[in-house]
Image (tube, helix red, strand yellow):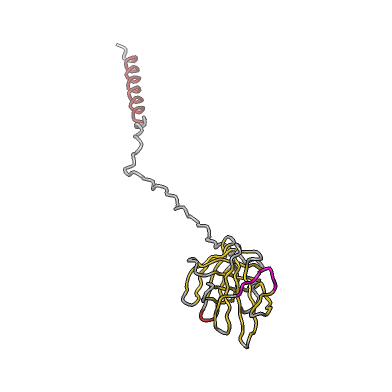
C-alpha cells in the first residue's frame, strides 16, 4: 500500500491546526468598557456679585435770595401785633408794633434769604424767605411768637418820623398794611403813646403843631 498521499494529507492537516492555533492566540481581547469615574464632580453654582446701589448725592435746595430792595408787611400768628420788614441789599430793618404799648425796632443781616435781627431790650427776629413770603419768629418784651409777612408796594409799608420836642427825642413808627389799615406808636423819651394819624402819600406829619418829615423806611435806613 502506498502511504505517500496519506502522509501528505496528515502533514497538511497538522499545518492547518498549527495555523489555526496561532491565529486564535493573536486575536485582540474584547475592548473593555470605559472606566466609570468613581467620583461625581459637582460644579459650584456661579453667583453674581451683589448689585451695588449708588445713591444720588443729597443736594440742599439753593436758598432764595431777597430782592435788592423790598418791604414785607404782615402780622404775628395770633394777630397780637403788626410786623414790617424793610430789606435793602444785605441789610434789614424791622418794626413790630401792637398800637398800644408794645413796639420794637430791630436791625441786622438779610443774607441768602434769611433774617437775623436784634433790637433793644433783647428783642430778636429771625425769618426766612419761601415762595416769596417771609415767615419766622420774633421776641419783643413778653411776646414770643411766629409771624408771616408778604411783599407790599407803596403806599403800604414801613414809615417813621424823628423829631426833638422839648428836649425829648420823638421816634414815631407806622406800619401800613395793603388794605390801608395803619398801626403805630410814638415814643417820647421812653414814654409810649399812639402815633398821630398820617397820610402815607404825604411827606410830613403834624406832631404837636409842627410839621415833621416822614420817611418810607428802606433796609439800610439806619436805626429806627
Residue 7, image x and y in percent? 32, 18
Residue 217, image x and y in percent? 65, 73
Part of the protein shown in magenta = 196-203
Residue 112, image x and y in percent? 60, 68
Is residue 209 shown above or below 58? below
* Residue at left offset 63%, top offset 75%: 160
For the residue pair 108 and 63, the one nearer the viewer reads as 108
Q: Residue furthest front?
A: 209
Residue 176, image x and y in percent? 61, 68
For the residue pair 204 and 61, the one nearer the viewer reads as 204
Labels in figure, total:
0
Residue 91: image quadrant is bottom right
For the residue pair 207 and 59, the one nearer the viewer reads as 207
Is residue 94 shown above or below 7? below
On-image quarter of the N terminus: top left
Residue 105: image quadrant is bottom right
Q: Residue furthest right?
A: 203
Name the magenta segment's main secondary structure: loop
On-image quarter of the C terminus: bottom right
Is residue 20 shown above or below 153? above
* Residue at left offset 48%, top offset 70%: 145
Q: Residue furthest bottom?
A: 167
Q: Residue furthest left?
A: 1
- Residue 32 shown in magenta: no
Residue 216: image quadrant is bottom right
Amino acid at each position: 500500500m502506498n502511504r505517500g498521499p496519506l502522509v501528505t494529507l496528515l502533514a497538511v492537516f497538522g499545518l492547518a491546526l498549527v495555523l489555526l492555533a496561532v491565529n486564535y492566540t493573536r486575536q485582540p481581547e474584547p475592548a473593555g468598557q470605559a472606566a466609570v469615574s468613581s467620583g461625581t464632580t459637582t460644579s459650584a453654582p456661579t453667583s453674581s456679585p451683589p448689585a451695588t446701589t449708588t445713591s444720588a448725592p443729597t443736594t440742599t435746595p439753593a436758598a432764595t435770595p431777597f430782592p435788592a430792595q423790598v418791604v414785607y408787611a404782615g402780622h404775628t400768628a395770633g394777630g397780637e401785633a403788626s410786623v414790617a420788614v424793610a430789606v435793602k441789599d444785605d441789610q434789614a430793618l424791622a418794626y413790630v408794633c401792637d398800637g398800644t404799648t408794645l413796639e420794637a425796632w430791630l436791625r441786622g443781616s438779610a443774607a441768602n434769604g434769611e433774617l437775623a435781627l436784634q433790637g433793644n431790650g433783647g428783642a430778636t427776629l429771625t425769618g426766612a424767605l419761601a415762595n416769596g413770603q417771609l415767615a419766622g419768629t420774633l421776641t419783643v418784651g413778653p411776646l414770643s411768637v411766629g409771624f408771616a409777612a408778604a411783599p407790599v408796594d407803596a403806599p403800604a409799608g414801613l414809615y417813621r418820623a424823628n423829631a426833638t420836642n422839648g428836649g425829648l427825642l420823638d421816634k414815631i413808627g407806622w406800619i401800613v398794611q395793603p388794605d390801608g389799615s395803619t398801626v403805630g406808636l410814638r415814643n417820647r423819651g421812653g414814654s409810649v403813646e399812639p402815633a398821630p394819624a398820617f397820610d402815607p402819600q404825604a411827606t410830613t406829619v403834624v406832631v404837636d403843631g409842627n410839621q415833621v418829615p416822614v420817611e418810607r423806611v428802606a433796609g439800610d435806613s439806619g436805626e429806627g
